[in-house]
Amino acid sequence: ASVTVGAPALGFTAVAKSLADTVAVPSGYSVTILYRLGDPINAATAAYGNTGSDTNFAQRAGDHHDGMSYFGLSSAGTPDANSSTRGLLALNHENITVGYLHPNGPTNFTAAGPRPEAEALKEIEAHGVSVIEVTRATAGAWSYVQSSSFNRRITPNTAMQFSGPVRGDANLRTRYSPDGTTGRGTINNCANGTMPWHTYLTNEENWAGYFRRLSGDAAVRTAAGRARQNSSLARYGISEGRQGNYFWSTVVASDPTSTIFSRWNATASTALAADGTADFRNEPFQFGWVVEIDPFNPASTPRKRTALGRMNHEGCQIGRTVAGVKPAFYMGDDAQNEYIYKFVSNTAWSAADADATDRLAIGDKYLDTGILYVARFAADGSGQWLPLVFGQGPLTAANGFTSQADVLINARLAGDALAATPMDRPEWTAVNPATGEMYCTLTNNSSRTPTGTRAVDAANPRAYTDPKTDGRSAGTGNVNGHVIRLREAGDTSEATSFTWDIYAFGAGSDLDPATINLSGLDATNDLSSPDGLWFGLPSNASGQVTPVMWIQTDDGAYTDVTNCMMLAAIPGIVGDGGTRSVTSTLNGATNTVTTRIGKAPGATLRRFLVGPKQCEITGIHSTPDGRSVFVNIQHPGEDATNPAAPTSNWPANQGGATTAATTRPRSATIVITRDDGGVVGL
Ligand code: FEO
Ligand code: CA
Ligand code: CA
Ligand code: CA
């Protein structure tokens, strides 16, 4: 079938903005609750009581469902790219709403601790990744297969292998891994990547927050000849005085040989060997990576792909694959004023690799050798990919870089040296399968200002005060975010230059069209803080194949008006809208920049879903036939200050109650289908 861009039209009625505690979808569509926090993944584990007393989270769904991929599964238990009724779902459990995990909230929740061992173990195991089998009965609804032998939980305690140029580097050596080739677990897994050879990429985002680092640590590192680590830790947000998000390192383990709690204290000890193999001072360097998982082999050891660099990895999506051409993998580093990256493999694509049975070996082939690039956006609508190669340009010993491993560990420092463009928080990336154009959500940036160090520029052109007086207190900067997109030179993934524009700016439809609502959003498609992003490629009843882009929000700015949402779009192409002059005014400073803006989306962008209270909508994938779309509802009712009076009762209030139900909210995967069996969205 031929692929059309920009047609046919979306085929549903827009969902209204809403503050209701429910998942709303268009008329003619249905929601099935599929896989909730605490759901057991084997026959031996009891149903979830949802009282805060449940244990054994390594055998249950974790919390904060996030990025997700569907892999079709054949009757032989092998990958089947055409199966739309049986598959494996791999999904991330990014974080936890700690208040609901215990009967009365967390105990000794201070830097002094000590945190109870059982509470900390539960919190640790509620992070990570799930792989679960899902099936759709003939003409029936979806369910997950509780006793499937494919089901697996990967947690922060699961054994990992390091792969690529940083494997074995001195910075990775710990008491657990004296040679720096192995590690334990993955944490704060945000967005995903779906590889054509049927593996899942999970990406370590806000890992830094979990570590304790006490004062005096920097001096010990300097004395041990590791002053470079101090600059690195500072650049990645691990300053002295940090206590760690959940104070796990305060646990006094019942097994004195266990280090699963003490490892979260990265403070270097003077009493122990200078190479770091007697303590966990190097543990922060074991995180911040892209991790590859083979969902079809539950016994396989996940591989941390160090060639893709170390940062707050949001997601990692592969661009179009073309035989004989080196594929590209697009990544955002989600923090204020961080960069967009791409990795170009050294290996040209061979379609036969999609059918290989040793899938992680194919990952070795494409993901372990190549060039990592960082993006610089120019005001004239062009841009460059700058290589992070040791010895090239400023990445030399004179500027503090010591090796290619050092460049990859310190990708942010390399991006600084290369004068990459600081962006308004790069979140998900997605590639239009019809055009190869890459889209990246820039969710918001409260530190963007008209002038100064973080001055507006053509690619990040807005800084303003949310003008609403109705309780919307979103502060200043780029309050509502935007979606940028780029077209590679020559339409090839190997390009080192590109052109770009801004697909759409987030805004309330009531805001000033000259300075804020630049894309002319209306009541059917206004949005704020775009985050999740994914292209499906469904075909309609006439056989027309159309790329549909899904946008999900993680917002605090428009949430006095509406809960977070998901929209569908049939976007055009880079350069279809022309230039626009944008004036930013904030705190007495004013600046005008010329940006590149896509054609106003109008009816080609439409709200498809609104979630329950205090949730984020994140994670989306579909079956290959486009008739079942999987979406994650993350942290409904996330204000858990009083667990006895939850701020949301979802999904219990939408057919998702448990056997011994309390109404505590639960993150969950849902499936959306059309009542007439048709393709979702068209
Ligand atoms: Fe986990 Fe940047 O979102
Ligand atoms: Ca996100
Ligand atoms: Ca976000
Ligand atoms: Ca979140």
Image: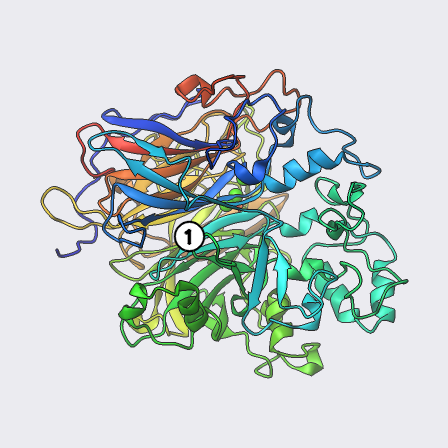
**For numbered disc 1, what is the local secondary structure?**
loop
Quadrant housing residue 58 = top right
Question: Which residue is the site of mark 1?
Answer: 295
Q: Is 564 in front, or is 183?
A: 183
**Badge 1 local density, few (<14 within 10 Å), some, or many (20+)?**
many
Give the vertical position of 537 relative to 143 (above or below): below
| Colouring method of the image | rainbow
| Left or right of 93, for residue 71 | left
Give the vertical position of 232 relative to 190 (above or below): below
Please state, as top left, top right, bottom left or bottom right, where the C terminus lies in the image: top left
Task: Pinpoint residue 609: horizontal percent, then vertical percent.
Answer: 35, 31
Q: Is 149 in front, or is 205?
A: 149
* Residue 440 visible somewhere in the drawing: no
Residue placed at 74% from the left, 52% from the top? 263
Task: Pinpoint residue 673: horizontal percent, then vertical percent.
Answer: 26, 32
Q: Is 170 in front, or is 97?
A: 170
| Left or right of 149, for residue 321 | left
